[in-house]
Amino acid sequence: MTINETIIILVGSFLTLSAWSYLYKENPFFTLFESILIGVAAGYMAVIGFRIIINEVIMPILAGEVLLAVPLIIGLLLMSQLLPGYAYLSRWALAFIAGIGTGLAVKGVASTMIIPQVLGTIQPFYEPSSLLGTINNIIVLVGVATCLFYFVFTFTPTGATGRIFKISATSGRMFLLILSGAVISGDYLPSMAYVIERTEFLIFNPPGSYLVPIALLLIIYDYWRTRTE
Amino acid sequence: MGLLQDFYKGKGDWRILFVMTFIVLLFPYLVPLGIPVPISQSTRDFKSVLDNIPSGGTVMIDFEGTPASWANLGALTVAVSNVCFERDINIIYLTFAMEAPDVHTRIVENTKLYDTLVYGEDYMNVGYVPGVETGMASWAADTRFISIDHHGNDVASLPIMKDIHTMGDLDAVIFVSGTTPDPWFRQFGPYNVPLLSGAQGGLVPIIQPYYQSGQLAAYLDDVKGAAELEQLSGIPGLALSKMDQVNLLYIFAVLLIIMGNLGRIMGKEE
């Protein structure tokens, strides 16, 4: 193993253990880790951003593509927010960016998000070859309709219609709660993957793995010291 | 049951649960369980789309993760890359996330055929494409929109880009993301290229309507889907080795939820 690899593994193990030390309690190691994480992430993104501007804007302008000065000026207008008295100039840039973004988003909404989804919901009630398919199609229809009822806030029907409306809205709320549960349980999977990968990094990468018993001893000593105090 | 009630009332020491979690996590390393990994239909469809791409074809992998998501999305992308390189399918890596460009290098280095790959012929790393949705629209319309790749090469001069001018020239687009997929469908959908997704766990319920409607050809469900693809393709990698721990941790989580609810019921009885 080279010196570089040894240093990388040691630093990685130290930072991993510093991050996990928060599980014990707030401590200076975790604070150090937070600062390093924010600093490195900000620095890396700054480098990537500058590289793009230089490669795709500055160099082509110097090579003769003068039109690229327009997005450069718009970007500089955004920076006017930092100048007291001239912050209003950034509104033009923001309006341009928001307009472009909205136009691009709206362009594909109907053809990719609304019509195909509606067509996908239109399924036969009865599938002769599959009982589960039939049940699934009915659940999809009921779920879509009742969820749409849940989001009607403009009026509240009364009487018999009101009762049906209220039952539909409550059913829609149940479907949305089931969706929330599925999303939250799905989010548990990547969290486990992160812990597993970091654990494997700590265990199977000497000399980084030697920091683990040192960290455990520090925690045990601090716990004993806190209890005796 | 007093311990459960203490936890339900917020008085318990949560560090006990962290220690128990680590014990459950470490158990399979001592006693490998080999829990079977059933393969879902979406993974079979994913493999089927890749199998239908002719040898020498080109796909684009849009990795929207960060170095922090290496464990799940990185492992997933390595599994997909392995299948592509095994079938002699060329890969164009790019990202609309600023933190991701260098992760592409790590992904390729972790593939089985890395030593045989030639940069610029078998794969390339466009790097960061700014603008998110505007960047997507621009790159889809003109793949030379970013003229210099992440390693400083002229994009137009690379052999892999010889016949790729718009997104329509690709054989498939694979976006690996932890965020809502709507921009990809809006900007990439009109090009009639098979769209495949490597989705972070919590995103799967969100993208399933797109899969059901046919807009999404197939998807992989986070590290579980990556493990299924590795098993289906016969190329074990970073994901399959984690599945024993994943299964045990899920069982542990269910037990904790049941115990938490028991503590709540016991608290009410008092």
Image: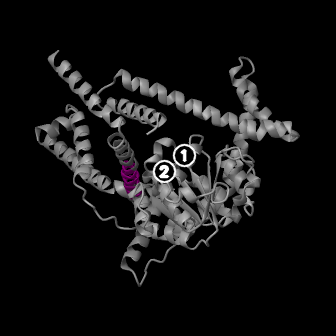
Q: What's the distance in space between the residues labelled 2 and 1, CA to CA?
A: 8 Å
Q: Report the front residue among A126 and A171.
A: A126
Image mark 1: chain: B
Q: Report the front residue among A38 and B237.
A: B237
Image: magenta residue range: A171-189
Classify residue B38 by image quadrant: bottom left
Q: What residue type is labelled 1?
A: Val
Q: Residue A123: horizontal and vertical position, in percent? A: 50, 74
Q: Mark 2: give few (<14), some (14-19) or many (20+) Cα within 10 Å.
A: many
- What quarter of the picture does the C terminus of chain A occupy? top left
Left or right: A53 in relation to B24: right
Residue A174 is inside the magenta segment: yes
Residue drawn at (78%, 34%), measured in percent from left and top? Answer: A72
Image mark 2: chain: B
Compare marks 2 and 1 and give the one earlier in the sequence. 2
Q: Which residue carries the number 1 mark?
A: B103
Left or right: A187 in relation to B212: left
